Image: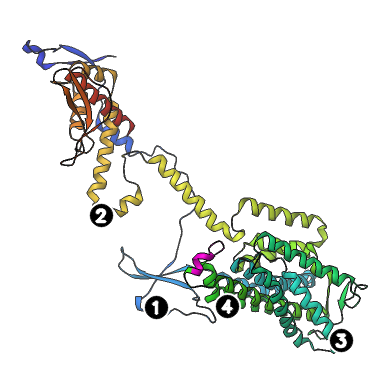
Amino acid sequence: MTYSWRNPLYVWGDVKGAEEEIPAGRHRMPQEIWDKTRQSRVPLLPVGRLRYYHKWAGHGGRLWGKLRYWPTRRRVLHISGEYNPKTMRAEKTIVDKRPIWWVLGLLALIVAPFFVPASMLNTLLVAGAFFGIYAAINLCWMLIIGTAQIYSLATFAVVGVAAFGTTWLSITFGFPWWSLPLLGAAIGLVCGTIIAIPATRLDGFYYALLTLGLNELCRVYALQSKQFGSSTGGLYGADTYIPADWAPMNQSLLGYYACFAVMLLALLLYRFVNGRRLGRVLRMAPEKREAFAEATGVNYRQARIQVFIVSSIALGFIGGFYASHYRGVGFSIFSFDTVLLGLAMLVIGGIGRAEGAVVGTAIVVFLDKVLISWGPVRLIMIGLIMALVVLFLRGGLFGIKEQFRAWRDKKKSERRSTRAEKGGEMLPEESTETEDKDLVYWRRYDKMQRDYLKTLVSPEVIEEHRKSPLGQHSEPLERLLLYFRRQPQIDKYAITVVEAFKAYRIVALSGQRGVAPRIVEDKVYGSQEEAYHGIFMRRVQDLLES
């Protein structure tokens, strides 16, 4: 079906170029655009849930009584207080829920022996004791790698030297079990000081190779030394805190809770170092920013060495406890397999997080000690988990939350970009930040108007304007011209005379007094009507691209 428009000026008979009837497009109702705009044209898929924080009613003055636990400056709970602009009430929100999860997790470890089946109790108690010791070792190692940014692989060398040294002292001189951790701390101080000296000159990959070689040197020396039990596979016979006359199950329970206490001491040390001045200094100036630290008055290298020595003392303490717990130590503590298992624990949980060290240790110990009947398959599983974490996670298991939020925000932005158009409606975040809400509704009206005007652009309308840029026009063309004429002066198209009645060019107005228009194209038009039609085509192009 063809549509036409009758020119009302044709009846006068003396209007130049007036035609009685010209082709026109189908008449469209603006209501169609309104209905179409209100419908969502993009499938909005759910991308994650919103962050939910429970709100408690409270008085603002009570929010400042924030309890901090010694010896750090950390608050027990990170509570944020603010006034709700909708309800005009003071509200409290727990922003960081990690202390709650820590308390629940530690309580679960305390009561776990009472809920484990009797058939598996002994196996789980032995694995739990192993977990407590290795979690404490990994927490101290996390201080070295995560906080001090020293890539040392001599952690188990310090623990092994302290364990062998305290076992030999207990066997030779009869030192009691309670003195072994203290003697181990002294040995750890000496070892940490010696190992820290190269850290002032070497860093990164070269220091890691040096410390790995030191670990292997300790293994070879202990393996070939008759004094340290080369014929028996280790040195055994140290005094122990576990009474010999107790029942085996009671001995396992005592060992489990003793190792759990050592892990708590390691957690306390981690919070003491990472949450106080040393940790804050090193977090302020991470690796590759030593110059920035020096410029702010911070002795960056000294802070790193201090953390390394403090961690070595703690590792020596754990080595002494290791000797008193197992009544000695074997050569396997120096082996490369032990170092790799320790690295797997840190990588799986996430480097730089205390919870990562504990949970990563729990996963590896469960696979390695509890599922021991699976044979070599359990080691393959540990390797696969480690490889998947390295390939797909940026911060270990405890970095999943932040990584998921970043991915969700990216998907939200992509969804918004599909709904956003050049010069279209405001996005939700723009609308909330705009004080003048009339601007929001004006942008919505202008968008719907442009969407409607796009439907009016047709070959018939363009041909009509080419034949008669000025004068009476059909309704679609008249609507387009009225919209174009209402545009602001900034970058509005106009024509300038190059030569009177012979040459014209299109320019864009600056909208500022005293600033000359800019030329938008090099094309020269031979008549004023051609220049008007050129402006019309440029405006139509801008409209269709908006």
Q: Earlier in the sequence, mark 1 or mark 4?
A: 1
Residue 208 position (above or below residue 165):
above
Tell me: 351 left or right of 81: right
Q: In which quarter of the view is residue 107 placed?
A: bottom right
**Local crowd at mark 3 within 10 Å, few (<14), some, or many (≥20)?**
few
Q: CA distance from mark 2 to mark 1?
A: 32 Å
Q: CA distance from mark 3 to mark 2?
A: 81 Å
Q: Amino acid at mark 1?
A: Trp
Question: Which residue was labeled with disc 3?
Answer: 172
Q: In which quarter of the view is residue 522 placed?
A: top left
Residue 413 position (above or below residue 178):
above
Contact between marks 2 and 1 (CB within 8 A): the answer is: no
Which segment did they paint magenta? Answer: 286-294
Q: Amino acid at mark 3?
A: Thr
Q: CA distance from mark 4 to mark 3?
A: 36 Å
Q: Earlier in the sequence, mark 2 or mark 1?
A: 1
**Local crowd at mark 4 within 10 Å, few (<14), some, or many (≥20)?**
some
Question: Which residue was labeled with disc 4?
Answer: 272
Question: What label sits on residue 435 in the rendered view?
Answer: 2
